[in-house]
Image: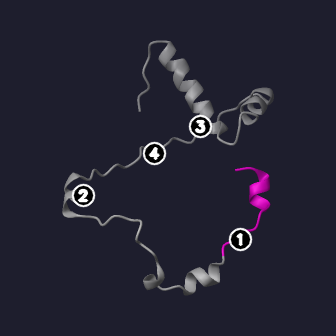
Amino acid sequence: MSDKDLKNTSRTNWAALESADDEGIDYSDIPPLTEDFFENATLRIPASQSQQLVKIEPDILKWFRSQGEEYPAFINRVLRRYIESRGETSTS
């Protein structure tokens, strides 16, 4: 998320949304959930991510940030590929 995004005000009409009742919601594009759906459903809980403080040199961080808003995920992919290129596997 960029600084520009943080400065933008939401255009959502929260008062109208909060005053709406469930009967006014259009569910016509959502298929009904059948017993078959629940029999075949799988609960998937995402693995937690470790948050660590890592010092990155300013020029390197600047380059990653220049690659787009999803630069933290990009850093993780680069690190994962490096580990895999060495014939090792991650422990996650």
Query: Label 1: which residue?
Result: 11
Query: Label 4: which residue?
Result: 48
Return the x and y of residue 73 as percentages of the image width and height.
59, 37
- Which is more toward the observer, 60 or 16? 16
SS at circle 4: loop
Q: Nearer the viewer, mark 1 or mark 3?
A: 1
Going by the numbered disc 4, the residue's amino acid type is Ser
Label 1: few (<14), some (14–19) or many (≥20) C-alpha neighbours in 10 Å: few
Residue 8 magenta-highlighted: yes
Q: CA distance from mark 1 to mark 2?
A: 36 Å
| Segment colored magenta | 1-12
Going by the numbered disc 2, the residue's amino acid type is Phe
Q: CA distance from mark 4 to mark 2?
A: 27 Å
Residues at marks 1 and 3 touching, judged by CB atoms closer than 8 Å: no
The label on residue 73 is 3
Q: Nearer the viewer, mark 4 or mark 1?
A: 1
Q: Is residue 29 above or below residue 5?
A: below
Q: CA distance from mark 4 to mark 1?
A: 32 Å
**Res 38 → quadrant:** bottom left
The label on residue 37 is 2
Residue plotted at (79% across, 30% down): 58
SS at circle 2: helix
Return the x and y of residue 55 as percentages of the image width and height.
70, 32
- Which is more toward the observer, 36 or 5? 36
Label 3: few (<14), some (14–19) or many (≥20) C-alpha neighbours in 10 Å: few
Q: Nearer the viewer, mark 4 or mark 2?
A: 2
